[in-house]
């Protein structure tokens, strides 16, 4: 079966992204198996997700519950879904019925709402704590100075499997660099305090993933690099 232009473009963007991740790992003297790629499919149709699945990926990032649930309904049990955008407490039940992981835990009240719901349905959810490393008021995430306290409070939430930290960096490359370094440092402090459960660092997007990898990222979240430009600017 011949590939359409859209599929061909997707294929070449995907392979080029993988290549660039490997190159960034080599430059940083890291083993590429330490860095996973989370394709971010927001603002792209479910058909693109289906095409990308033919190339291997099974897990996809979305930043809105409604859109994630829509694609999940369209595509059935094949893909799994990672929520990377702000989650409102009134959407916890709907989100939990779809997502396999939450990378954007950003408040104690959200943690409590998740804990209550997960306790009721009897399952655990892998989560990353989102940290606002950029200082921009428009971005969500826990203040870096609050992270040690915030994460200590999560001990009261046994249904949250807390695995690491996530950030959306400042658009300025130098500020982003500092943000990545800060996140890495926080992760190390958490490890010193709590141990190996703090493994993961989700940082790096299309424009800054090489720098994030140099600073120890274990998961880069790529939208544009893989799916191309978004028709409608995505909401955060
Ligand atoms: C949209 C989005 C991404 C991907 O952004 P690109 O710049 O297109 O790679 C990654 N993380 C989050 C939280 C996002 O909202």
Image (cartoon, grey):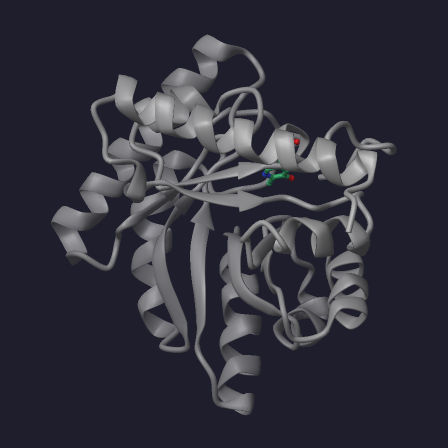
Q: Where, quadrant-wise, is the C terminus in this rendering? A: top right
86 sits left or right of 46 in the view: left
Residue 207, by quadrant, is: top right
Residue drawn at 35 percent across, 35 percent down:
217
Query: Where 88 sits versus 37, above or below?
Result: below
50 sits left or right of 221 in the view: right
Q: Is residue 179 visible?
A: no
Residue 78, by quadrant, is: bottom right
Residue occupying the far front of the picture: 1
x%, y% of residue 62?
Answer: 67, 51
x%, y% of residue 208?
Answer: 50, 21
* Depth check, front residue: 215 or 91: 215
* Depth check, front residue: 113 or 125: 125
Residue 35, by quadrant, is: top left
Query: Where 215 sits versus 39, above or below?
Result: above
x%, y% of residue 133?
Answer: 45, 29
């Amino acid at each position: 079966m011949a590939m359409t232009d859209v599929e061909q473009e997707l294929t070449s963007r995907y392979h080029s992204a993988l290549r660039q991740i490997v190159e960034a790992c080599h430059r940083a003297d890291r083993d590429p198996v330490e860095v996973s790629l989370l394709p971010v499919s927001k603002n792209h149709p479910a058909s693109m997700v289906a095409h990308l699945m033919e190339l291997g990926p099974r897990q996809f990032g979305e930043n809105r519950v409604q859109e994630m649930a829509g694609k999940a309904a369209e595509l059935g049990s094949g893909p799994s879904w990672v929520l990377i955008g702000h989650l409102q407490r009134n959407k916890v039940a709907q989100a939990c019925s779809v997502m396999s992981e939450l990378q954007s835990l950003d408040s104690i009240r959200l943690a409590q709402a998740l804990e209550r719901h997960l306790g009721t349905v009897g399952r655990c959810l892998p989560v990353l704590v989102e940290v606002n490393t950029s200082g921009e008021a428009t971005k969500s995430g826990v203040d870096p100075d609050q992270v040690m306290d915030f994460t200590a409070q999560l001990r009261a939430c046994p249904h949250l499997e807390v695995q690491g930290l996530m950030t959306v960096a400042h658009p300025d490359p130098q500020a982003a660099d500092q943000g990545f370094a800060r996140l890495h440092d926080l992760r190390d402090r958490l490890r010193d305090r709590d141990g190996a459960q703090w493994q993961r660092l989700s940082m790096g997007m299309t424009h800054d993933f090489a720098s994030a990898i140099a600073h120890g990222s274990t998961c880069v979240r790529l939208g544009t690099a893989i799916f191309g430009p978004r028709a409608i600017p995505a909401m955060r």
